[in-house]
Amino acid sequence: MAYASFRDFLAALEKSGELTRVGVPVDTELLITEWADREMKSPGGGKALLFEQPVVDGKVSKFPVAINTMGSRKRMAMALGRESIDEIAQEIQLILKAKPPTSLRDGFALLKQGIHLLHARPKSVSSAASQEVVQILDPSTTGISLRDIPILKCWPKDGGRFITLPHVHTRDPETGARNVGCYRMQIFDERTTAMHWQVHKVGARHGKRYYERNERMPVAVTLGGDPALSFAATAPLPDGIDEILFAGFLRKKSIEMVKCKTIDLEVPAEADFVLEGYVQPGELRPEGPFGDHTGYYTAIEDYPVFHLTAITHRKDAIYPTTIVGIPPMEDFYMGDASVRIFLPVFKMNFPELVDMTLPAEGVFHNLVFVSIRKHYPYQAFKVMHGLWGMGQMMFSKYIVVVDEDCDVHNTSEVLFRLCANTDPERDTSVIKNPSDSLDHAPSEQNIGSHMGFDATRKLPGENYRRKWPELLRMSDEARRLVDQLQKRTT
Ligand SMILES: Cc1cc2nc3c(=O)[nH]c(=O)nc-3n(C[C@H](O)[C@H](O)[C@H](O)COP(=O)(O)O)c2cc1C
């Protein structure tokens, strides 16, 4: 089901008992974070929160703040209009099965084609709710500014206020291909922000093209609208797969796009806010510190500057945001959905792959658990090396491979297998690979070592010269009898 607006999505959450309204004034500086952090740490991710009276610089903002709207399995599925995320994985599997691809490249090409066939192509429209109020920013402008949007200062030592759930729209100046990525933006003043696209991300690659041509880069940022796009902007789609198309596929309805007022880009017509502007080649400014996904503050570093040329918005706009920090946080459910949706694509490349998860403790890239159906020696190593070569999986710091009968979603079971089944020298592989820019542990930023653990049972040919022992299992008969006895005593 496609939502007509972000407000419509919040209404659906409220109807399902998934949203709590907060009617009292709450400061956007630290207090919304503290409130939302308690919610995100409660069992299953708590509820979505709608702060109806967010306070900025001592004044109540006219725009409410919504947070934790995707922070549980149920809400993440609702954001994509499904009962369960696994429905989407099944739909992707059907597309891939239509004509089984012979390589990963083929797989994504087919996926793209399938998505097109499902009428997900964006539609251009000439008028839009996201442009109900238009504020062109020239020197005499006195209307809405970034100060009027209830943007959070999340953690005490943050360098300022940060937009944390933006959809950053850019175009490759050579191919015209569009990209939408979620890159945080620190507010410098009413007209400028930082643009925190890290070096490995598509926005940064597009930026590099403009710098090489010494051309000003048009950038549009949207906030709100259908949450399918918020998810698509964070999903690790291969460079070249259009997030607008993908979001259209997810919501089973094209996204309507409208031309920006001051730059040559199109944005979703149903967004809550649109920030139009540009990035000037070569202009960098210190960004941070910021309390990050890692649970630590990331240090101050130079990033491009985004200059605003216009702000447009819905009259009844709601500001969507999130916070990141020590896990578990809302972003865990977004990352988890990505893995589950793309599992069929991984399985296509690794037929032995049974299941995979990125546990919350690993904050996306630090820890990956994979189960495989193992047939031949060193197959676990083949899988981990293959994963390190796939898009953003390159950042995976620790990959643990277990046998198919181990539930990767049960961290305790995986740790038991890891400890029981490995001889550290024989069963590990350490490689050099690019590291996540946010990872503070490597000696140098963006590069580091990663480690794979083969926690599967050892086969002949894997330097194990003894008989592999049998895992304890109770007999079916004993289990059945105890089930009956327990029923009688309760
Ligand atoms: C809440 C949230 C905030 C994020 N902030 C950033 C960020 O500031 N910079 C960045 O490069 N990636 C950030 N990411 C990760 C990217 O959104 C993600 O890697 C995405 O796939 C990038 O899209 P791209 O491949 O089109 O560049 C964030 C993810 C989430 C869930």
Image (cartoon, rainbow, N blue to C red):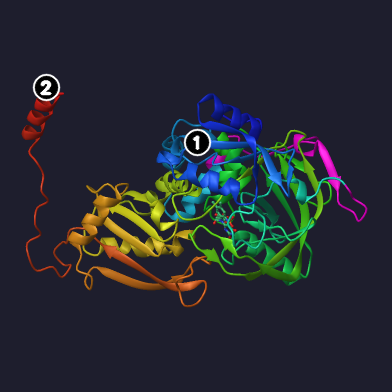
Instruction: Name the residue: 35% across, 50% down.
Output: 356
Secondary structure under badge 2?
helix
Q: Is residue 116 visible?
A: no
- Which residue has dot 1 on it? 47
Q: Earlier in the sequence, mark 2 or mark 1?
A: 1
Which stretch appears magenta?
A: 114-142
Instruction: Name the residue: 40% across, 57% down.
Output: 362
How far across and down, in percent of the image, does residue 337 sit? 46, 44
Instruction: Name the residue: 51% across, 71% down.
Output: 446
Instruction: Name the residue: 51% across, 47% down.
Output: 37
Q: Which circle marks residue 488 in the picture?
A: 2
**Considering the image in quadrants, where does the C terminus appear?**
top left
- Amino acid at circle 2: Arg
How far across and down, in percent of the image, does residue 317 sit? 72, 37
Task: Locate ligand 1 by image quadrant.
Answer: bottom right
Give the residue at the far top of this rendering: 488
| Left or right: 450 as drawn, with respect to 1 | left
Secondary structure under badge 1?
loop
- Residue 254's place in the image compared with 212, above or below, is above
For label 1, the crowd category at 10 Å Cα-Cα, with few meaning under 14, some 14 to 19 and many 20 or more, is many
Nearer to the camera, 99 or 239: 239
- Amino acid at circle 1: Lys
Whole-number angstrom distance, CA of label 2 to CA of label 1: 38 Å
